[in-house]
């Protein structure tokens, strides 16, 4: 209460209209703290975290271990005190010297004989650290780990995405267990970011030299050349312009460019384009994806020009969200003098597309009319006002699918990229099946989509205890590049068990802290929560299940038989405790209902000490779960898990996986590194399948997992369990690492893409023009190409494996030369419907011409026994194609 003019008044606290962050002025001797705080290497480098923790250990924890916030909150007196502390100053200087050494020392990539000059890596989300909440789930965490591993290995890579002012939502629970969302208001100035500013614009000749594209205009953006922030400009319908500034997050060696539309130059609608990750309707999403793709390319150009760096020769789309980047690059090449087809050829040569989606329903699709609205202008222009010189019809055709009214972003990505991959071996197979219609006439196995199995960044996800052991056994340099993890097999079993117990104890303390906080938020009084001190037991087998909550991940499979689960949780001799976490998309009430089922079960007084649901799953919570859980549970509907990396992170910490054989686990399970839950793949009834697989889960827990954990020797060590842990560290350690993944991309995708781009770009893109001309001629002639006759000879009356089969084919090439095609004999096992399987292809030799047709021949051994058949097919051939299936053209004899 107070008084105004003699009248008693009640004052209420005023609310800030806008939040901004003011950073402290650092004493000169501690100036290096600013450098350490703004390079996100600290997020995976424990010694640097210790430097900031020493400022004020209690405040460090309260502020979420955020160096930038620490420097804003630590009192000036404390900074002055530490500036006079010689030991602390030496610690800061040593940490800064270590960072500079990390940034400058030669790395793996620098020792390779060939590779790209620069890679632009586009993703709609990046999970680098919880301090920068620009992610929702696995896609973003994978992208963050990709950047970190690229930094460790020294790849010349630039990340590109959007900066979401509210990030992804924070999750809490209502009293009855329903998910509640709220969105933070993030201040970029309070994050480890800096603005991209322009030093000077590049001249046309300099731009041409960097782009290898001939003279072209400067990229569409505001560049004053005076150190002012760069503004990326993207035209919108109704003559509006979407403007975005560009923030830079430095991830070790890797710059991450994040576009931000929340600036006064935009009207309120356009200002909100980068408000929330995966929020809004279709109109909102297409604006986000146009900004990410088209604006992202323009941001890259501004960044490389400002820093005197080479422009990327490889562009990597991490999912289809940023697919419009390829259309912007077509515009760039067309402005340099190429026609559309040659520009498309140049774009394809240097583009890699990664799909993370195992089902068509997971693909981003837009109404064709909406795409035409954004790319075609107000009056249905044939030439795009957004991308002058580019035909709207050609843009729409790149995203076409069977339904002509739909624009498919995955199809766009595949048509713009010469190389594509899934994210596990099984997912590669699923993707080839799913996208096979784009390569009609080819077997699914021949669809040109490969696979690179995802990996995880060990220094981010492994507990400090494991990192220190790894440093002791393999040395700090190998640990920094995440190599030598398998050497942890040399650690004594007793020591491994002690570490596992310690990490489980840390998890139990964190579970109790979070359970208490959640119940208080749900409305409980502190006096009601004495029981929380008994939640979980550091000696009990701990199982973790944490992930997003779409239906196919089956969060509630564990509740299929509640009484059987209750019996396991409360078993007096061999109990289990279960920690569950996950977020449902705000619009998915079905997913929220699944969460509520788990919460209500966990609230039961009889089991609440053995099962918990922890709200607000993010990177900070995930670490504790990966560190402390003995078993990581994963029970998706196979094969709907593209990869899944949470189990990999648990494995790095000595956790054993209990999982359906889906995603990465399908290829890496070996019978000794965990357990495979039997599946009921052939059962069509979803409820029956869930019943069967839930029963298999319970059975595996009761008969295999629990007995092995509680079987102890005279020192109370579960020897057989720990042998599995040691085997897991030795065998899975090297396979699940993000460094392995990035090496796979560098060798199998980036280097070939850079070589292809170089080949088409030489001599003012003579190769691109040549291949585009070849493609036009082949596509025009292809409907008339025919296999006219196939003759066979040479086999005995009763052939056996290895007998030589002679084949002769007469083919009408419709004006194409024999050198422009490949003719193959295809042999395989033949079924009752005459379909071939287990096929092998043998190239036939051109044997001459006859009456306007071409003759091809081959002698080849019969590769199989049983019912064997053959056919002949014709495929395009050109030195600049990545393979015979690239154009999706094939001709076989008519039945």
Image: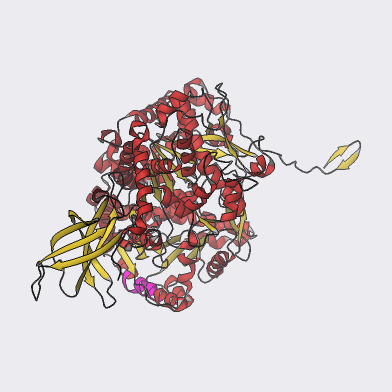
Residue 490 image position (x, y, % from top left): 22, 50
Secondary structure of the magenta portion, mostly?
Answer: helix
Quadrant position of residue 519: bottom right
Residue in front for this viewpoint, 774 or 647: 774
Q: Residue at x 62, y 66 (%)?
A: 176
- Is 698 in the magenta? yes
Of all residues shown, which one is farthest toward the right? 6
Vertical side of 712 occupied by 356: above or below: above
Residue 542 image position (x, y, % from top left): 40, 62
Screen quadrant of the N terminus: top right
Quadrant position of residue 531: bottom right
Screen quadrant of the C terminus: bottom left
Q: Count all numbered tags in the image, as a single digit.
A: 0
Residue 523 image position (x, y, % from top left): 65, 60
Residue 756 image position (x, y, % from top left): 32, 41
Vertical side of 451 occupied by 402: above or below: below
Image: magenta residue range: 695-705
- Is 335 in the magenta? no
- Residue 128 is at least partly visible in this image: no
853 lies left or right of 123:
left
Vertical side of 130 occupied by 109: above or below: above
Vertical side of 316 occupied by 572: above or below: below
Residue in front for this viewpoint, 568 or 476: 476
């Amino acid at each position: 209460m107070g008084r105004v003019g003699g009248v008693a008044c009640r004052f209420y606290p005023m609310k800030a209209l806008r939040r901004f962050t003011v950073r402290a002025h650092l004493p000169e001797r501690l100036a290096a703290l600013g450098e350490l705080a703004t390079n996100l290497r600290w997020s995976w480098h424990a010694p640097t975290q210790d430097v900031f923790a020493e400022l004020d250990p209690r405040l460090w924890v309260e502020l979420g271990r955020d160096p930038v916030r620490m420097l804003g909150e630590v009192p000036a007196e404390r900074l002055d005190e530490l500036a006079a502390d010689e030991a602390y100053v030496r610690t800061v200087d040593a940490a800064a010297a270590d960072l500079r050494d990390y940034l400058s020392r030669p790395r793996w990539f620098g020792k390779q004989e060939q590779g790209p000059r620069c890679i632009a890596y586009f993703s709609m989300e990046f999970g680098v650290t919880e301090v920068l909440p620009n992610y929702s789930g696995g896609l973003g965490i994978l992208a963050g780990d990709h950047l970190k591993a690229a930094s460790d290995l020294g790849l010349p890579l630039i990340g590109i995405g959007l900066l979401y002012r509210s990030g992804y939502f924070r999750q809490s629970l209502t009293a009855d267990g329903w998910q509640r969302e709220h969105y933070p208001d993030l201040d970029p100035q309070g994050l480890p970011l800096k603005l991209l500013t322009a030093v000077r614009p590049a001249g046309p000749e300099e731009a041409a030299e960097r782009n290898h594209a001939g003279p072209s205009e400067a990229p569409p953006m505001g560049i004053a050349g005076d150190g002012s922030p760069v503004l990326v400009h993207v035209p919108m319908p109704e003559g509006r312009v979407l403007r975005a500034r560009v923030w830079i997050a430095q991830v070790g060696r890797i710059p991450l460019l994040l576009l931000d539309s929340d600036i006064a130059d935009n009207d309120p609608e356009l200002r909100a384009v980068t408000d929330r990750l995966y929020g809004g309707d279709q109109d909102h999403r297409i604006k986000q994806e146009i900004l990410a793709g088209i604006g992202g390319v323009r941001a890259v150009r501004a960044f490389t020009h400002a820093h005197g760096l080479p422009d990327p020769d490889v562009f990597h789309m991490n999912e289809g969200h940023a697919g419009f980047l390829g259309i912007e690059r077509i515009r760039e090449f067309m402005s340099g003098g190429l026609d559309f087809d040659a520009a498309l050829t140049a774009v394809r040569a240097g583009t890699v597309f990664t799909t993370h989606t195992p089902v068509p329903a997971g693909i981003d699709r837009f109404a064709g009319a909406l795409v035409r609205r954004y790319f075609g202008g107000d009056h249905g222009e044939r030439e795009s006002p957004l991308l002058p010189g580019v035909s709207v019809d050609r843009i729409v055709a790149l995203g076409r699918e069977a339904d002509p009214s739909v624009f498919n972003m995955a199809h766009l990505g595949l048509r713009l990229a010469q190389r594509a991959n899934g994210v596990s071996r099984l997912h590669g197979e699923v993707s080839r099946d799913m996208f096979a219609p784009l390569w009609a006439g080819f077997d699914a196995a021949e669809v040109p989509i490969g696979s690179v199995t995802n990996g995880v960044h060990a220094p981010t996800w492994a507990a400090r205890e494991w990192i220190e052991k790894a440093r002791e056994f393999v040395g700090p340099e190998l640990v920094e590049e995440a190599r030598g993890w398998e050497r942890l097999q040399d650690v004594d079993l007793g020591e491994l068990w002690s570490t596992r117990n310690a990490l489980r104890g840390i998890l139990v303390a964190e579970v109790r802290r979070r359970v208490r906080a959640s119940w208080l938020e749900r409305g409980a009084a502190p006096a009601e929560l004495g029981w929380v001190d008994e939640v979980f037991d550091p000696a009990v087998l701990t199982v973790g299940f944490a992930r997003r909550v779409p239906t196919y991940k089956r969060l509630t499979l564990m509740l299929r038989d509640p009484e059987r689960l209750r019996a396991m949780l409360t078993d007096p001799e061999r109990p289990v405790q279960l920690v569950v976490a996950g977020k449902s998309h705000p619009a998915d009430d079905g997913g929220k209902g699944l969460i509520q089922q788990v919460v209500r079960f966990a609230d039961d007084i009889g089991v609440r000490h053995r099962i918990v649901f922890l709200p607000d799953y993010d990177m900070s919570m995930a670490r504790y779960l990966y560190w402390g859980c003995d078993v990581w549970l994963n029970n998706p509907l196979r094969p709907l898990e593209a990869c899944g990396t949470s189990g990999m992170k648990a494995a790095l910490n000595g956790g054993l996986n209990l999982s359906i054989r889906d995603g990465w686990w399908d290829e890496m399970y070996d019978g000794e590194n965990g357990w495979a839950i039997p599946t009921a793949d052939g059962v069509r009834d979803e409820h029956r399948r869930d019943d069967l697989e839930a029963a298999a889960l319970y059975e595996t827990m009761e008969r295999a997992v629990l007995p092995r954990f509680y079987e102890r020797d005279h020192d109370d060590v579960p020897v057989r369990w720990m042998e599995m842990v040691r085997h897991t560290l030795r065998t899975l350690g090297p396979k699940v690492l993000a460094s392995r993944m990035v090496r796979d991309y560098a060798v199998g995708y980036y280097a070939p893409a850079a070589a292809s781009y170089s080949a088409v770009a030489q001599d003012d893109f003579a190769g691109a023009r040549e291949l585009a001309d070849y493609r036009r001629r082949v596509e025009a002639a292809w409907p008339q190409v025919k296999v006219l006759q196939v003759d066979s000879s040479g086999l005995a009356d009763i052939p056996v494996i290895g007998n030589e089969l002679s084949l002769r084919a007469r083919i009408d090439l419709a004006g194409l030369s024999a050198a422009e095609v490949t003719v193959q004999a295809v042999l395989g096992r033949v079924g009752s419907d005459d379909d071939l399987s287990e096929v092998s292809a043998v190239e036939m030799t051109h044997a001459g011409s006859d009456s306007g047709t071409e003759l091809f021949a081959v002698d080849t051994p019969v590769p199989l026994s049983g019912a064997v058949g053959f056919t002949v097919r014709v495929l395009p051939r050109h030195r600049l194609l990545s393979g015979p299936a690239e154009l999706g053209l094939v001709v076989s004899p008519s039945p």
